Image: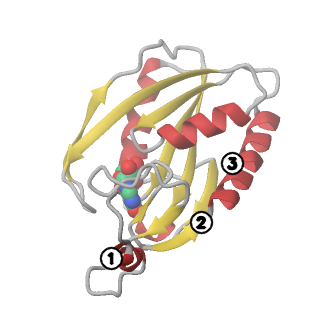
Amino acid sequence: MDVLIQEAEIRQRVAQMARRIEADYRGREPHFVGVLKGAAIFHADLVRELTLPLTIDFLSVSSYGSGTASVGPLTLDKDLEDDIKGKDVVLVEDIVDTGRTASFLFRWLPKRKPASLRLCALLSKPSRREFPASPDYVGFDVPDRFVVGYGLDYNQMYRNLPYIAALRSPNEEPSIAHSEHTATSEP
Ligand code: IMP
């Protein structure tokens, strides 16, 4: 895999995003809703950067599929625990890719009558957009490659990498895998 965004760059950008959010929500108590599982790590780092009084919650949606493709209708796997009526909700996503998840949630969440609703995404792949979704806060635009790390997975793996990396296609020369082959000790 190729490292696209280093750990230090992520930390710096999350802090910048937090300063903008603080400026926009000064005097209010926003409610940060993380979309599991991908946004869990970004959500945790973002809310700890924020000096505003705030609350958090999580939801999860899924569609059939694995690996790098998802197909089929979206379903809500885990609903919110808290009532969002009258709250300033910030939806926190790992990545806006086709925009399908965000546009689904932006049709569904307003039915719960939040005072406001904004979208904050660590990553965005603008070239892949098929559904209307434009994040109010974006960490980084990334190219049309499958990325992992900092919460993002490939078949549930790599979420714990502290950086963002792009998977290489199978016929490309692996770099990280090569160094693993040269290791002599057991895990
Ligand atoms: P959507 O296409 O914008 O609905 O993206 C749906 C979800 O697919 C995201 O929240 C991610 O969890 C996942 N996803 C999309 N692109 C990638 C990627 O490059 N790496 C890992 N997960 C991805």
Residue 164 image position (x, y, % from top left): 52, 62
* Above or below, 110 relative to 61: above
Q: Which mark is residue 14?
A: 3
In depth, the one of 15 and 76 nearer the eye is: 15
According to the picture, the residue beneath numbered tag 2 turns out to be 5
Residue for point 54% across, 21% down: 114
Query: Helix, strand, or loop for circle 1?
Result: helix
Q: Residue 181 bears which disc, if any?
A: 1
Tell me the quarter of the picture where residue 70 sits. Answer: bottom left
Residue 10 screen position, x and y as percent: 65, 56
Instruction: Say whether residue 98 is visible.
Output: no
Between discs 2 and 1, the one toward the N terminus: 2
Q: Position of residue 37 (x, y in %)?
A: 39, 39
Q: Quadrant of ligand 1?
A: bottom left
In the rendered image, the residue lying farthest to the front is 185
Q: What amino acid is found at the position of numbered circle 2 in the picture?
A: Ile
Give the mark nearest the N terminus, 2 or 3. Answer: 2
Q: Which mark is residue 139?
A: none
Of residues 103 and 62, the one drawn nearer to the viewer in this rendering: 62
Q: Which picture quadrant has residue 1?
A: bottom left
Query: Would you place residue 175 above or below residue 85 in this image?
Result: below
Q: Is mark 2 within 8 Å of ligand 1?
A: no
- The image shows residue 153, relative to residue 166, as above or below, that is above
User: What's the CA distance linking mark 3 and mark 1?
Assistant: 34 Å
Q: Position of residue 80 (x, y in %)?
A: 41, 20
